[in-house]
Image (cartoon, coloured by chain):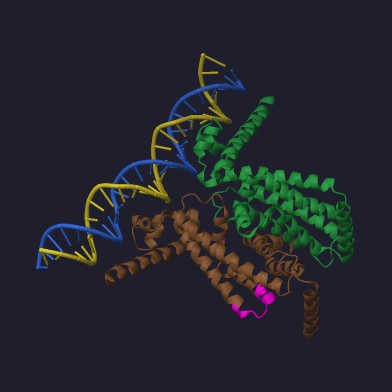
Chain colours: A green, B brown, C yellow, D blue
Amino acid sequence: MGIQERKEREKEHRRDEILNAAQKVFFEKGLQASTMDEIAEAAELSKGTLYLYFKSKEDLYLAVMTRGMELLQDLFDKAISEADSPLDQIRKMGQAYRTFFNEHRNFFRMFSFFQHPQFHKQVSEDMMAICHARNQEIWQKVISIIKRGIEQGFLRDDLDPAECAIMLWSNSYGLMVRMDTQLEYFRENFGVDLEKLIDKSSELLLQSMMTDEVREKMSFSRTRNDEQHS
Amino acid sequence: MGIQERKEREKEHRRDEILNAAQKVFFEKGLQASTMDEIAEAAELSKGTLYLYFKSKEDLYLAVMTRGMELLQDLFDKAISEADSPLDQIRKMGQAYRTFFNEHRNFFRMFSFFQHPQFHKQVSEDMMAICHARNQEIWQKVISIIKRGIEQGFLRDDLDPAECAIMLWSNSYGLMVRMDTQLEYFRENFGVDLEKLIDKSSELLLQSMMTDEVREKMSFSRTRNDEQHS
DNA sequence: GTAACAGCTGACCGTAAGTCATTTACTTAA
DNA sequence: TTAAGTAAATGACTTACGGTCAGCTGTTAC
């Protein structure tokens, strides 16, 4: 009986090896410039075998991408568990997203690429469903934290949690795309440090979502801290 | 003497015809799924001829994209000239960007695609330079308007014009990407109308950049309008 | 030992980007 | 008018890559 299970394990392991090879190649060259032959060689398998595990190159690409989604989820969970107030949770999630962007740039680019309607052609239903489910999980997580922030009086109660989540996320995302492609350009031409700007912009937006009391309390403690520093 | 010039004109005209054909095909199918044979047929030329005018498929793609950049610039110019105050100019530019997104979605997607580091491989120096120049022009335009807004006391003078421009632009851009790919998803799952959210988010961010007096004056006139409406 | 089977292989196919020797169309000059 | 010269256009060809499939190989079951 154990044979069935061993085979199951081996198959899973083989799939994982393919994903490792694919990840390596995709990270180096991107979807377009990577070839299935190259990935097969990196995995020490023949090309045909790849197609026993994945429907197409795009399918394989998405499978690698889901690893990135898992990683981001883990970072979010860690951020949430380490924070002490809902407001702090929101901030730490923002930080986690920025950490993800900085330290796992290749995964970020995959997410970005996945957005394009150019894509979704040769992808299996299954893989699409997995991506959707993971995506949903991540959004649920972010929204629920913001909801708690509103309920506990940190954020204005005339705001919608989902709307806030989308605004905060998209605001960071937009700047990250800019940073990924034009970091040097903006530094040289306009003297702008995009890295710092993401922090600043997130904080600006978050503040405009806070209740007046919380914002005032915060700016008071901020001032006090500044005085201590100087 | 006139022959040289006529030939020049004809060549320009031919180039334009190729661009028309390419635009049509690219809009329908995107970069990946469009073929040079298809574009050649649409242009009623042979494939080889395309390569006399453009270095590669990507080069041709970028050439079409620069038309979109021109279009956006025109919309911005129109918006700026029609507005009466710097604050109004900023708002109308935001609206112009959103109009561009809604009415020239295919160009927006091209811009988006151009962002990817996956891209810039087979592109000629010349085309790259043209894209950069146009990009620079657009940013200059946006930044100069915001600078005036600060100088004339509409926006806080502790803010940097370039930073504000990037924040406002990226904020809208991030939401547009979301809207382009997940409009239905967010409506169905979270009851969020992304279309309205872009307006809301832009206004929220813009308000947080205003000086206190201007913001108060604005919210007063807003309240008065609301009372008139009800 | 051998039949049955799952997993793997790589030669092969179709398609599409890009090239280039040749043809066509037009200009110039005798 | 025509022949030489030149610029533009052609499409068959090369190369490369995604995807397929008939057959091979090593393992299990009897």
For the point 64% across and 32% down, the residue is: A13
Near-viewer residue (C17 or A225): A225
Quadrant of the drawing holding the N terminus of chain B: bottom left
Q: Which of the 4 quarters of the picture holds residue C29?
A: bottom left
Near-viewer residue (A66 or B49): B49
Per the picture, the main secondary structure of the magenta-coloured stretch is helix
> Is residue A172 depicted above or below B90 in this figure?
above
Range drawn in magenta: B81-91
In the picture as drawn, the residue positioned furthest to the front comes out as A230
Q: Is residue B219 left or right of residue B187?
A: right
Q: Is residue B130 left or right of residue A217?
A: left
How many numbered discs? Answer: 0
Q: Is residue B228 magenta?
A: no
Q: Is residue A94 left or right of residue A225?
A: left
Q: Position of residue C4 (x, y in %)?
A: 55, 27
Q: Which of the 4 quarters of the picture holds residue B219?
A: bottom right
Near-viewer residue (B156 or D20): B156
Near-viewer residue (B208 or A137): B208
Q: Position of residue B43 (x, y in %)?
A: 38, 63
For the point 78% across and 81% down, the residue is: B221
Q: Position of residue C23 (x, y in %)?
A: 22, 55
Q: Is residue B42 visible?
A: yes
Q: Is residue B82 magenta?
A: yes
Quadrant of the drawing holding the C terminus of chain B: bottom right
Q: Is residue B28 visible?
A: no
In the picture as drawn, the residue positioned furthest to the bottom comes out as B228
Q: Is residue B120 left or right of residue A139?
A: left
> Is residue A176 depicted above or below B86 in this figure?
above
